[in-house]
């Protein structure tokens, strides 16, 4: 699907891609949005803009890392939107081509930043303002993700000493993998925004740089929080392993105490069972003597373990 908007003397309105491009060449501002279109359609639609073939090829392929390429008359910017689903992020590439009189966006499937821009067309002030709006909304959606990760880490910290199975361990591993996937995108995306704030690109007017720096500051905060969460999750995993080892040691200690208390009992009963027949020797109090000996040996063993503080 292709949607197009044109801003001219009559305001911003939705129109056809052909009319939007003609209006841009006549002094207006055009925004053309591609959703799940192939390269042939994009190449034919954008032919009047004379966009480099490599840009068109990269635009339709979701294999790009966040970046900004300067082609003089226009910029090619690649960013990623993110949504946190359970224990891992869902990332979607958003390609943008920014010129002095036009903005081209390409994505596979709906994204919240593009949908928000559809509802609030900030095109009359120029394509760079619309670019800022898209980046601003895109980065804003990263903030709830880091809040969700912080809540999950706090929850896992409380469950470590309560869970006796492997559920918490698996959840920590999945959380670490999700954060690693998110960090691999946020890091390059942070550098991309930094380049937009520092380099003197012709298509980005100087008055827009403070706004882009504000977006960069928020994404830098997200990146710093993800770095701290990585360390916390590693510590959390070590703590869970230590807690599991501690519980295992407690179980082994109890079993060892039981075996230690029962050892003299086994020795005494085995000795008398192999060498004495109490009925043959007419020893009427023999059973009482043996039972007292068993109880006494168990009691002495228990007292010795308590004195050594092994219980």
Image: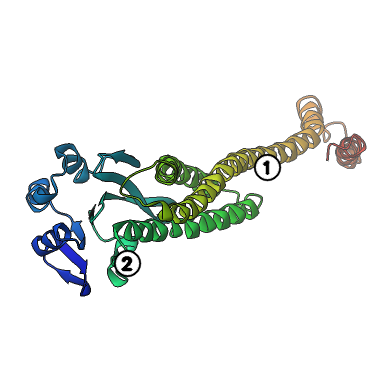
Q: Quadrant of residue 76?
A: top left
Residue at the image position 68 percent from the left and 42 percent from the top: 247
Residue 167 appears left or right of 206: right
Q: Nearer the viewer, residue 251 or 142?
A: 142
128 vs 186: above or below: below
Q: CA distance from mark 2 to mark 1?
A: 60 Å
Q: Position of residue 267 (x, y in %)?
A: 79, 28
Disc 2: which residue: 122
Work out which quarter of the rendered image holds the C terminus and state it: top right
279 vs 216: above or below: above
Residue 302 appears left or right of 259: right
Q: Position of residue 131 (x, y in %)?
A: 33, 56
Chain-order first, disc 2 or disc 1:
2
Residue 247 badge = 1
| Mark 2 in CB contact with mark 1 (< 8 angstroms) | no
Residue at the image position 49 percent from the left and 55 percent from the top: 214
């Amino acid at each position: 699907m292709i949607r197009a908007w044109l801003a001219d003397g009559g305001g911003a309105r939705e129109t056809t891609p052909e009319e939007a491009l003609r209006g841009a060449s006549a002094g207006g501002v055009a925004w053309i949005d591609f959703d799940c279109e192939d390269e042939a359609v994009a190449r034919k639609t954008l032919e009047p803009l004379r966009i480099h073939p490599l840009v068109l090829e990269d635009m339709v392929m979701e294999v790009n890392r966040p970046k900004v390429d300067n082609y003089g008359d226009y910029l090619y910017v690649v960013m990623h939107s993110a949504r946190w689903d359970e224990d891992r992020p869902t990332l979607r590439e958003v390609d943008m081509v920014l010129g002095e009189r036009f903005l081209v966006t390409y994505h596979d499937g709906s994204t919240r930043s593009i949908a928000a821009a559809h509802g609030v067309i900030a095109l009359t002030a120029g394509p760079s303002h619309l670019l800022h709006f898209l980046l601003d909304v895109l980065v804003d959606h990263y903030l709830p993700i880091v809040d969700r990760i912080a809540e999950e880490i706090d929850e896992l910290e409380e469950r470590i000493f309560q869970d006796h199975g492997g559920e918490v361990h698996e959840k920590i591993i999945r959380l670490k993998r999700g954060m690693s996937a998110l960090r691999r995108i946020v890091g390059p995306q942070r550098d991309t925004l930094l380049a937009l704030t520092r380099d003197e690109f012709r298509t980005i007017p100087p008055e827009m740089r403070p706004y882009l720096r504000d977006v960069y500051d928020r994404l830098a905060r997200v990146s710093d929080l993800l770095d701290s969460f990585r360390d916390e999750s590693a510590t959390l995993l070590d703590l869970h392993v230590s807690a599991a080892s501690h519980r295992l040691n407690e179980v082994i200690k109890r079993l060892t105490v039981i075996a230690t208390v029962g050892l003299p009992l086994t020795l005494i009963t085995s000795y008398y069972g192999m060498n004495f027949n109490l009925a043959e020797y007419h020893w009427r109090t023999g059973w009482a003597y043996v039972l007292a000996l068993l109880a006494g040996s168990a009691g002495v063993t228990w007292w010795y373990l308590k004195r050594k503080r092994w219980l």
